[in-house]
Amino acid sequence: MFDLDLRDSLSSMPRKLWTAAELDEMTPAEVDQLFKASIVRDLDEVPPAFLARVRADVEAHIAATEASQKP
């Protein structure tokens, strides 16, 4: 239902891709800290194209869910 291939709209968000080997060398606390640091909490930091695609997917899901719940 959702378009999960959002790589193009995320291209402006710089990020490090961690390998399994790199993660294996970290302590659980370091992995947890890395995960927490990767979460974007400010929508101003999200590329507009990505935000628009996510919003459209969510609105479509809500519309489909509400339509299927009507008697």
Image: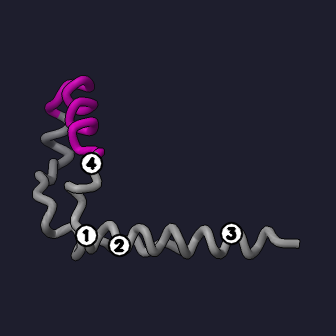
Query: Residues under labels 1 and 2: Cα distance?
Result: 6 Å
The residue indicated by pointer 4 is 42
Relative image position of residue 8 (x, y in whole percent) = 22, 76
Residue extending farthest to the front is 44
Question: First in sequence: mark 2 or mark 3?
Answer: 2
Relative image position of residue 36 (x, y in whole percent) = 27, 36
- The vertical placement of 24 against 71, above or below, is above
Query: What kind of element bears circle 2?
Result: helix
The residue indicated by pointer 2 is 52
- The vertical placement of 37 against 12, above or below, is above
Q: Is 34 on the left-hand or right-hand side of 63?
A: left
Of 17 and 14, the residue lying toward us: 14
The residue indicated by pointer 1 is 48
- Judge depth for marks 1 and 3 and give the one in front: 1
Of 2 and 57, the residue lying toward us: 57
Query: Residues under labels 2 and 3: Cα distance?
Result: 20 Å
Relative image position of residue 50 (x, y in whole percent) = 29, 69
Give the colour scheme of this rendering: one colour
Query: Tag 2: Cα neighbours inside 10 Å, few (<14), some, or many (≥20)?
Result: few
Query: Residues under labels 2 and 4: Cα distance?
Result: 15 Å
Query: Tag 3: Cα neighbours inside 10 Å, few (<14), some, or many (≥20)?
Result: few
Question: First in sequence: mark 1 or mark 3?
Answer: 1
Q: Please say whether residue 37 is one of the residues in the magenta stretch.
A: yes
Asked if disc 1 and disc 2 are in contact, CB closer than 8 Å, the reply is yes
Three-letter residue code for mark 4: Asp
Asked if disc 3 and disc 4 are in contact, CB closer than 8 Å, the reply is no
Query: Residues under labels 4 and 1: Cα distance?
Result: 12 Å
